[in-house]
Amino acid sequence: MAIAALRRIPLHLARSHPPLSLRPLARSCSSSSPDPSSGSSKVADRVVKLFAVDPEGSKHEVIGLAGQTLLRALINAGLIDPASHRLEEIDACSADCEVHISQEWLDKLPPTSHDESYILTRASRNRILNKHARLGCQVVLQPELQGMVVAVPEPKPWDTP
């Protein structure tokens, strides 16, 4: 008797609810303002424009997005070879994304981590850390960095083919 009752349940459900393919899809169309903690809904609100000076001394406008690394913005602008730095993790870094940042902008960045300092020192010829050197893969763009000027140093002699 219980088995017979269980067999009737699917029939009862099928009669009371239309098949899924016939149901209208419900969409939520809210016109409320976006939640500030979830980030901006417009890409234009996240754009960070900065300037990069290449090894020849030419100044280039670089456009990145807030939350993106400086390395990604420089690669997109064609100033750093993407093959030279495949991963944006400090463990895989070889200092090919080293950039030099002026003091006024360095003060707006978080301090250099121990790993970043070690990699920059290891990559320098005299084993002396340049106080303006940072790894592009470790600098995260923020709206406060609008207008920042960075210098892309020339490749180290021991790195050129």
Image (cartoon, rainbow, N blue to C red):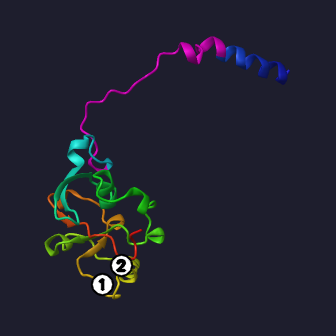
Res 124 quadrant in image:
bottom left
Q: Return the x and y of residue 66 as percentages of the image width and height.
A: 27, 54
Residue that label 2 marks: 120
Q: Which residue is mark 1?
A: 129
- Image quarter (top left, top right, bottom left or bottom right) of the C terminus: bottom left
Report if the CB atoms under discs 2 and 1 are less than 8 Å apart: yes
Q: In the image, what residue type sits under mark 1?
A: Leu
Residue 23 screen position, x and y as percent: 52, 15
Tell me the residue at 59%/15% (across/down): 17
Which of 159 and 96 lies nearest the eye of the viewer? 159
Residue 67 seen in this snapshot: no
| Residue that sits furthest to the right in the current view | 1
- Quarter residue 72 falls in: bottom left
Please say whether residue 36 is one of the residues in the magenta stretch.
yes
Label 1 residue SS: loop
> What is the secondary structure assignment of the residue under circle 2?
helix
**Nearest the camera: 41 or 124?**
124
Q: In the rendered structure, which amino acid carries the disc numbered 2?
A: Leu
> What secondary structure prevails in the magenta region?
loop
Residue 133 in percent (x, y) is at 27, 75
Which residue is depicted at the point 34% across and 74% down? 156
Is 104 magenta? The answer is: no
Q: Which of the marked residues, 2 or 1, is nearer the chain's N terminus? A: 2
As drawn, is 102 to the left or to the right of 157? left
Q: Is residue 120 left or right of residue 64?
A: right
Magenta-highlighted residues: 14-37
